[in-house]
Image (spheres, grey):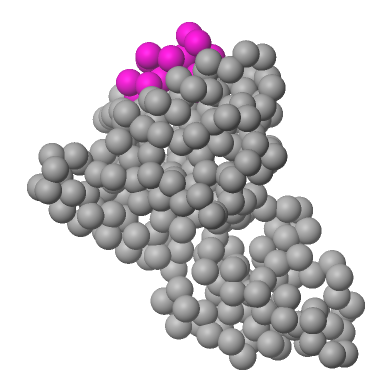
């Protein structure tokens, strides 16, 4: 089901790319670039430990002090195939200045990824992702989804959908220009932005919850059971045709059900006991 949703988003992105190309000879525009409203709203990127295509352990924390382009992608994603040659160029161009690309493949297994890696002559680390890693970074609504992380470990931009190479390059240059590992307070994304939308990351209490993505720590055991019944009676509007509870349990990466479930929790907490 997860792949079906992401594939539908990828198909939509391909159609959008074609339309924009014919309109203005630009292969695609970013679907959304999320910019934090203020410097204090640049969240720290959550650490993770995943396995690369050679079976080696990769920890995000080990890249602290570098500018990181973190790319969620899949071999079956058309816009991802368009972007990746550009990421290869960026890795060649800026790695000596402290820049790295890390690809997180959302494919079901590593075999097609290895073939793709060799075919596209990818020159950067690729690790195998899962639902939990997507939730850790606020949910992956579609592929590709790319995040720019500064030397200080903060997330400065989030692109949902493919973006022009010039957008990434402009943002990378700004982050590389920062001295040391301090926060880049005046950073502004180069692409189109949605200024009212914060970049979100998952919290342990949400990720380890009985309802993934929803912090139930304020509820008693009886209240948790009652709240889950509420979610069972509410439909998810992501297109899965399931209840909010089933969608949260089956698809941890679904941003729609996560948002709706959190809204239901707010109502539940405010309701009379």
Name the outermost residue toward the left. Answer: 22
Residue 26's x, y, as percent?
19, 39
Q: Is residue 91 magenta?
A: yes
The quadrant of the picture occupied by the C terminus is: bottom right
Left or right: 115 in relation to 142 = left
Viewer-nearest residue: 170 or 105: 170
Viewer-nearest residue: 95 or 265: 265
Name the outermost residue toward the top. Answer: 96
Splitting the image into 4 quarters, where does residue 112 fall? top left
Viewer-nearest residue: 26 or 258: 26
Left or right: 189 in relation to 252 = left
Can residue 76 be seen at all in this image of the molecule?
A: no
Q: Is residue 27 magenta?
A: no
Residue 44's x, y, as percent?
68, 38
Viewer-nearest residue: 140 or 159: 159
Task: Give the magenta range.
Answer: 88-100
The quadrant of the picture occupied by the N terminus is: bottom left
Residue 212's x, y, as percent?
67, 65
| Position of 47 relative to 171 (above/below) | below
Left or right: 68 in relation to 15 = right
Q: Main secondary structure of the magenta part?
A: helix
Q: What residue sits 38% from the left and 15% below the top?
A: 92
| Position of 23 relative to 248 (above/below) | above
Q: What residue sits 45% from the left and 83% below the top?
A: 241
Can residue 167 be seen at all in this image of the molecule?
A: yes
Q: What residue sits 78% from the left and 58% below the top?
A: 205
Splitting the image into 4 quarters, where does residue 243 fall? bottom right
Q: What residue sits 67% from the left and 53% below the top?
A: 202
Left or right: 39 in relation to 171 = right
């Amino acid at each position: 089901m997860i792949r079906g949703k992401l594939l539908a988003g990828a198909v939509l992105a391909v159609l959008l790319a074609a339309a924009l190309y014919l309109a203005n000879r630009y292969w695609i525009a970013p679907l959304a670039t999320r910019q934090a409203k203020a410097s204090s709203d640049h969240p720290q990127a959550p650490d993770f430990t995943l396995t690369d295509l050679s079976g080696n352990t990769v920890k995000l924390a080990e890249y602290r002090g570098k500018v990181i382009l973190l790319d969620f992608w899949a071999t079956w994603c058309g816009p991802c195939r368009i972007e990746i040659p550009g990421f290869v160029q960026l890795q060649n161009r800026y790695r000596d200045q402290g820049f790295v690309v890390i690809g997180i493949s959302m494919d079901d297994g590593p075999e097609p990824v290895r073939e793709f890696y060799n075919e596209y002559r990818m020159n950067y680390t690729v690790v195998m992702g899962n639902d939990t890693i997507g939730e850790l970074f606020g949910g992956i609504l579609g592929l590709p989804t790319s995040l720019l992380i500064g030397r200080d470990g903060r997330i400065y931009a989030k692109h949902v959908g493919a973006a022009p190479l010039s957008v990434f390059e402009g943002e990378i240059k700004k982050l590389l220009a920062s001295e040391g590992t301090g926060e880049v307070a005046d950073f502004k994304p180069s692409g189109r932005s949605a200024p009212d939308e914060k970049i979100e990351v998952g919290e342990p209490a949400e990720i380890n919850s009985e309802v993934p993505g929803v912090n139930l720590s304020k509820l008693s055991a009886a209240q948790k059971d009652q709240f889950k019944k509420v979610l069972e009676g509410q439909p998810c509007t992501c297109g899965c045709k399931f209840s909010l509870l089933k969608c949260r349990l089956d698809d941890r990466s679904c941003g729609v059900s996560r948002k709706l479930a959190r809204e239901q929790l707010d109502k539940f907490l405010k309701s009379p006991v």
